[in-house]
Amino acid sequence: MSKDNLLEAMIARLQSDKKPTDKKQKIAEAAVQLFAEKGYANTSTSEIAKRAGVAEGTIFRHYGTKENLLLSILLPFLKESLPGMAESVFREISSQGMDSLEDFFRALLKNRYQFFKENREIFQVFIKELLYNENFRNEIVPHFTENVFQRIRQTIVHFQERGEIRDLPAQSLARTIFTFVFSFFVSRFVLMPENAFLDDETELENFVQIVLHGIKKGN
């Protein structure tokens, strides 16, 4: 199982909690399996119903839409898994050495690039709900703030103490970096997924240089 694949991780979680007589459990497991096999967009509710052994109307009665079905599985999974995922990511980055802010930023981007690439369809649904679904946003944002944003803030403070970053509020700097990184992945995998980008390595390196050194030509 790929450590970055959310659908595979959700399948494993659902199977560990398996309740054979629970229709919603069967629907959820069938849905995630099909999303992993065929992709979210290419999976129909009729296919999910057939694999789960239920009528298609049962899916609509419980969830309303295919998107709501995915979110009903994804949201509790993220809330439960995000602390461990964040700890693992930052531990992995730290193990590579953080001799400079540039090293850290580059490692963070490379680490998450493959994750978003592998989970592109889920990420697209996630972004849509984050923008337009207030209940979803209120549920998930505090978990990102606690587990991701605060870790970035701690890293900012670390490099400020080393004299690598200007003496500006760490909270503001962390918010700026988080916004830059998040916007980069939204642009790459949601807004312009089919546009002709440079190769991944070059695209990431250009982004690192722009964020850390700006676009103004030096003297």
Image (spheres, rainbow, N blue to C red):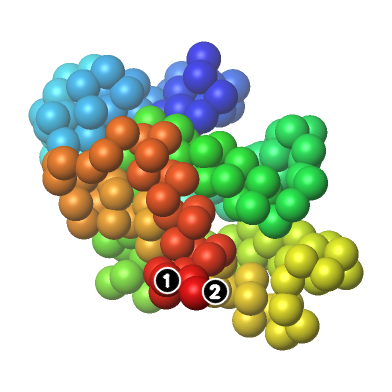
Q: Read off the residue under disc 1.
A: 217
Dot 2 surroundings within 10 Å: few (below 14), some, or many (20 or more)?
Answer: few
141 vs 71: above or below: below
Q: Nearer the viewer, residue 177 or 74?
A: 177
Q: Nearer the viewer, residue 21 or 107?
A: 107
Q: Nearer the viewer, residue 135 or 218?
A: 218
Examine the rendering and report whether any part of residue 9 can be seen. Answer: yes
State the residue at coordinates (36%, 35%). 200
State the residue at coordinates (41%, 35%). 201
Image location of residue 40, percent across then percent down: 23, 34
Left or right? Give the position of 162 relative to 53: right
Left or right? Give the position of 174 relative to 62: right
Image location of residue 138, percent across then percent down: 49, 73
Q: Nearer the viewer, mark 2 or mark 1?
A: 1
Secondary structure category for the residue under label 2: helix
Rendered image quadrant of residue 183: bottom left
Dot 1 surroundings within 10 Å: few (below 14), some, or many (20 or more)?
Answer: few
Q: Nearer the viewer, residue 43 or 184?
A: 184
211 vs 103: above or below: below
Amino acid identity at mark 2: Thr
Amino acid identity at mark 1: Lys
Q: Earlier in the sequence, mark 2 or mark 1?
A: 2
State the residue at coordinates (49%, 71%). 218
The disc placed on residue 10 is none
Left or right? Give the position of 144 relative to 119: right
Image location of residue 154, percent across then percent down: 79, 64
Q: Read off the residue under disc 2.
A: 176
Image location of residue 207, percent across then percent down: 43, 54
List the single residue furthest toward the bottom: 168
